């Protein structure tokens, strides 16, 4: 039947569960989900233009006072 037979997939899934255990697989799934969310967020952040952050009341071209020099 080939590798796409459902019986092969059941056996493969059973072997993976026996090797790693259900607890590790549960954590692996949540870690993978968090990684995908982080990747999507990083990709959407790349689409936004970069804005320079300035504190209120201060301009980027503000010169220091003479007594601070």
Image (cartoon, helix red, strand yellow):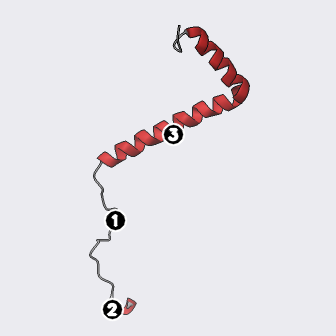
Q: Is residue 15 left or right of residue 56?
A: right
- Label 3 – label 2 distance at C-alpha: 51 Å
Badge 2: residue crowd in 10 Å (few <14, some 14–19, many ≥20) = few
**Where is residue 50, by image quadrant?**
bottom left
- Label 1 – label 2 distance at C-alpha: 22 Å
Q: Is residue 3 left or right of residue 23?
A: left
SS state under label 1: loop
For the point 36% across and 66% down, the residue is 55
**Mark 3 and mark 2 residues within 8 Å of each other at the beta carbon:** no
Give the label on residue 66, or none: 2
Position in image of residue 22 (x %, y %): 70, 25
Q: Earlier in the sequence, mark 1 or mark 3?
A: 3
**Mark 1 and mark 2 residues within 8 Å of each other at the beta carbon:** no
- Label 1 – label 3 distance at C-alpha: 31 Å
**Where is residue 43, by image quadrant?**
top left
Give the label on residue 35, or none: 3
For the point 29% across and 71% down, the residue is 59
The residue that label 1 is drawn on is 54
For the point 47% across and 36% down, the residue is 36
SS state under label 3: helix
Position in image of residue 28 (x %, y %): 61, 33
SS state under label 2: helix
Q: Is residue 42 left or right of residue 61?
A: right
């Amino acid at each position: 039947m080939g590798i796409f037979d459902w019986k092969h997939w059941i056996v493969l899934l059973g072997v993976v569960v026996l090797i790693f255990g259900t607890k590790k697989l549960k954590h692996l799934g949540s870690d993978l989900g968090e990684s995908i969310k982080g990747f999507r967020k990083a990709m959407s952040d790349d689409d936004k233009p970069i804005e320079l952050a300035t504190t209120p009341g201060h301009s980027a071209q503000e010169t220091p006072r003479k007594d601070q020099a």
